Image (cartoon, grey):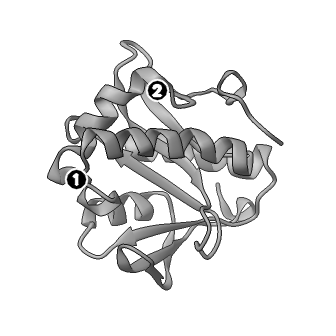
Amino acid sequence: MTYTPADFPVIETERLILRGPRVEDFEPLAAFYATEHSRFVGGPLTPELAWRMLAIETGHWTLRGFGRWAITRKDTGEWLGMTGLWHPEGFPEPELGWDLARHATGQGYATEAATAARAHAYDTLGWTTLISLVADGNDASGRVAERLGARPDGRFTHERFGPMNVWRHPAPKDLT
């Protein structure tokens, strides 16, 4: 399946809207990538490299038929981060990931958004398993993985980021 930005599925949760990345996401995405807070996901980056990340996020939908959504607050439309399904060349299998702006952390947004993205993978795409890759030292993401019911499942050496922890999500039949 090939997606264009108008075709990206939209998911609503209690507090959030997950929607495909858009050009208007560039400024908050670049602000996220300009900080040390982005160190576990490739940052800090210059604005030009952040633009490339936005293009990568959008292009993944076209190349794979799935991707990551911009996380926005339902009540204000404020951009909070990115979450979703990711499987670039070289990854061991499809990943569920989440990146939140610093001001959005600690409020349950990552867990809420990732739960919805995982449901899409299982219920809409028919997947039976997912992993999340968490860099050494990224304790906050490890806690999100635990809240999602994922369990440690070995290590993966990322081409650019080095060794990472693999977290295995429960299969659809094991979710309650």
Q: Which mark is residue 90?
A: none
Which residue is at the far front?
A: 48
Vertical placement of residue 68 versus 42, above or below: above
x, y percent for residue 12: 57, 25
Q: Are marks 2 and 1 in contact (CB under 8 Å)?
A: no
x and y percentages locating residue 6 in the rendered image: 68, 21
Task: Indicate the quadrant where residue 128 lies.
Answer: bottom right
Q: In the displayed structure, would residue 23 be above or below residue 143?
A: above
- The percent coordinates of residue 153 (x first, y second) are 52, 82
Of 123 and 52, the residue lying toward us: 52
Identified at 40% across, 78% down, the residue is: 164
Nearer the camera: disc 2 or disc 1? 1
Does 30 appear above or below 92?
A: above
Observer able to see residue 108 = no
Circle 1 sits in a helix, a strand or a loop, which is it? loop
Under mark 2, the amino acid is Leu
In the picture provided, is 101 more to the left or to the right than 121?
left
Estimate the x, y position of residue 49 in percent, counting from the top left.
34, 46
* Residue 44, disc: 1
The kind of residue on which mark 1 rests is Pro
Residue 107 versus residue 53: which sits nearer the camera? 53
Among all residues in the image, which is located at the extreme bottom?
154
- Label 2 – label 1 distance at C-alpha: 26 Å
